[in-house]
Image (tube, rainbow, N blue to C red):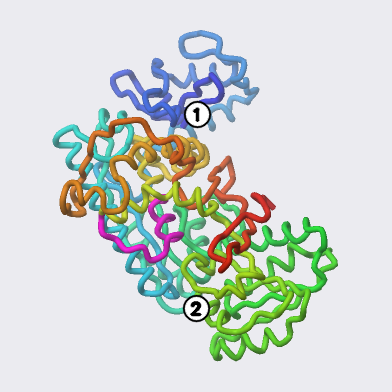
Amino acid sequence: MGQVEGDLLVPPITGNFLYATRLDKQYAVMDPRVSKIFNQAHEAYTDASLLEAIDHGRNNSGGEMTVAMPRYNLSESDLKALTAYLKQLSLQWSPGVTDDRIRFATVITPDVDPARRKILIDMLQIIARQKNGSTEAASKARTRHHMTSAAEMVLGTERNWDLDVWELQGDESSWGEQLAEHYRKQPVFALVSGLSNSTWQPVHDFCEHEHVPCWFPSVDLPVKTQDQYSFYFSGGVLLEANVLAHHLSGSNVLPKHLIQVFRDDVVGRAASQELVHALEGSSVKIDNRALATDKPINDSLRNVLATVKSGDVVMFWLRDADVATLGKLKPVPDATNYFSARLFNAENVQLNAKWKKSSHLVYLYELPGKRESNLNYFHAWLNLRKLPLIDETMQSEVFFAFNFLTDITSEMLNNLYRDYLVERAETMINKREGIKAEQETRDRFYLGRPGDLIRKHGEMTADESVRIQITGPANSAAVSHGTTIYPHLSLGPGQRFASKGGYVLKFSGEHGEKLIDESGWIVP
């Protein structure tokens, strides 16, 4: 499908582009930063002229092609086979796409609590209504209320979205067949977002088997294998384990004894095993304390703390409710404690000052001050639509996943092929972040602080799209450098984890009310 490489514009080479006449012109956006740069126009190739280009580097006008274009010394039979392949490549849209619609689905595993499940579904419904309402308005009045490409509007390639929710039931061993059944009934172009507090492996495997993109789910335990079709925000608890190992290994005094405390479930086991593996070969002695999932947590934690000694390091792979219970017990004097920020929402769960004095967070997100600036637009969006903030990490991930998908599918125009979506994601995410951060900084002045828009203009329904002229310069002190809860998002060919590092933070202040960076950004 082509790309821009330096000052070279490499046009698409699928058959429908190579053989298209000027009356049947096919369009592709070449540079995602500049939506007006399209593939170059050329006369339709023939089999003979295409073979000449591949073999001798002369285009169909007889001109010499750039030296960057390789000359392939292929046999006649290989050239014919290659030509036949290019002619059939991307002849049809991928499943889930029609002339005027694209169908997506999101997956929710049965371990997700009702409040998180509900807010995800509520956000999906509002996003779909907003997207489709704007699409229909654009088709009727040639006006646009969300940011997509001008090319999409002019060429009339914008489509409505259908969003299905695939809720899995029962044991994980049956999830693969449930997903296959959903797909047999209604194929989708991609799985977008999604929630799980346990394993994501069956969903990942389904996507790889069916060649369905799995688009940035909100999961604690991503699949470590970087396959073709699955994208993740980060490595979750697996990345946290490696960030902590890197931090401990780089300290002046490597701890002699490390105790890992975790629920005996798939996430806890995977996180603890990853940390053991990351510290393999070091002098650190590691003890794992798995807490049964069917016994009172208070007694189990009390028994674990009884074995912790002064000078020990303890890594708690525990969720909010378990940390809240732990906070009612006395910390071991002179022991150093670490908590997983992926599992433990430190900003909202109360941990008393005695615990905070000796505790640290392994933290995959943007530092609190910058994080607030980056998420101002997201919070204003929630406020405008009267959506509660249940889980900032998850909800901001969902918001980004769908906004990024909107941007990419709009730039794809009519070239709605799954492998093209994958390729665009690899090349667009870091460019998109820079552009979108500037855009959202400007738009924050239209959205304002939570409640400002409603106070100024009155109550509005979630379906209404109101754009207000933004005037005046942006406050440079409030400029965002990203649009997500993560500090750095980037991908390259074959990369599937967009954020690749994290921090170790410590509690500061008289009552541990602040979080400050202790380690700097760590990329293991």
Residue at image x 73%, y 81%? 308
Q: Is residue 509 above or below residue 522?
A: below
Instruction: Kindly identify the amino acid type of the residue bearing the numbered disc 1.
Output: Gln
- Cα gap from disc 1 to disc 2, whole angstroms: 49 Å
Q: In this view of the protein, which residue sits in the foreground, 72 or 287?
A: 287
The local secondary structure at tag 1 comes to strand
Q: Quadrant of residue 108?
A: bottom left
Instruction: Kindly identify the amino acid type of the residue bearing the numbered disc 2.
Output: Ala
**Residue lying furthest front in this view?**
510
The local secondary structure at tag 2 comes to helix
Residue at image x 40%, y 23%? 37
Asked whether 462 falls inside the magenta stretch, the response is no
Residue 47, x across and y down, in percent: 47, 21
- Mark 2 or mark 1, which is nearer the start of the sequence? 1
Residue at image x 46%, y 38%? 477
Question: Which residue corresponds to mark 1?
Answer: 3
Question: Which residue corresponds to mark 2?
Answer: 321
Q: Is residue 358 left or right of residue 248?
A: left
Magenta highlight range: 385-401
Label 1 crowding class (10 Å Cα cut-off): few <14, some 14-19, many 20+?
Answer: some
Label 2 crowding class (10 Å Cα cut-off): few <14, some 14-19, many 20+?
Answer: few
User: Does residue 412 appear anywhere in the picture?
Assistant: no
Asked whether 399 falls inside the magenta stretch, the response is yes
Residue 77, x across and y down, in percent: 58, 29
Report if the CB atoms under discs 1 and 2 are less than 8 Å apart: no
Q: Is residue 474 above or below residue 136?
A: above
Q: Is residue 431 above or below residue 242?
A: above
Q: Is residue 41 above or below residue 63?
A: below
> Given this view, does label 1 or label 2 mark the residue nearer the observer?
2
Q: Is residue 321 left or right of residue 224?
A: left
Mark number, residue 208: none
Q: In this view of the protein, which residue sits in the foreground, 7 or 234?
A: 234
